[in-house]
Image: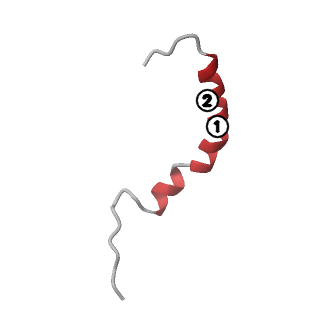
Amino acid sequence: MKKVFILSWFDKSTVKHLRLPFSFYLMPVFLFALSQAGSING
């Protein structure tokens, strides 16, 4: 069996702690706030 090398920053714990499903729930709130902003200071 051949070992597959994965980048050190891309392991299961990294993906787990990104909390991607939570960011999908929060995205509509962010986009609504962004649409209501008078000016955006980048």
Q: CA distance from mark 2 to mark 1?
A: 6 Å
Compared with residue 4, is residue 1 higher up or lower down, i.e. above or below? below
Q: Residues within 10 Å of mark 1 (few under 14, many from 20)?
A: few
Q: Amino acid at mark 2?
A: Phe
Q: Quadrant of the N terminus?
A: bottom left
**Labels 2 and 1 touching (C-beta < 8 A):** yes
How many numbered tags mark residues here? Answer: 2
The answer to whether residue 32 is left or right of residue 10 is right
Of 34 and 26, nearer the camera is 34
Residue at the spot 46% in from the left edge and 55% down from the top edge: 14
Provide the residue designation for mark 2: 30
Residue at the spot 67% in from the left edge and 41% down from the top edge: 25
Q: Residue furthest bottom?
A: 1
Q: Residue furthest top?
A: 38
The answer to whether residue 6 is left or right of residue 34 is left
Q: Position of residue 15 (x, y in %)?
A: 49, 56
Which structural element holds mark 2? helix
Residue at the spot 45% in from the left edge and 15% down from the top edge: 41
Colour logic: secondary structure
Q: Quadrant of the C terminus?
A: top left
Q: Residues within 10 Å of mark 2 (few under 14, many from 20)?
A: few
Provide the residue designation for mark 1: 26
Q: Quadrant of residue 30?
A: top right
Of 14 and 31, nearer the camera is 31
Q: Quadrant of residue 27?
A: top right
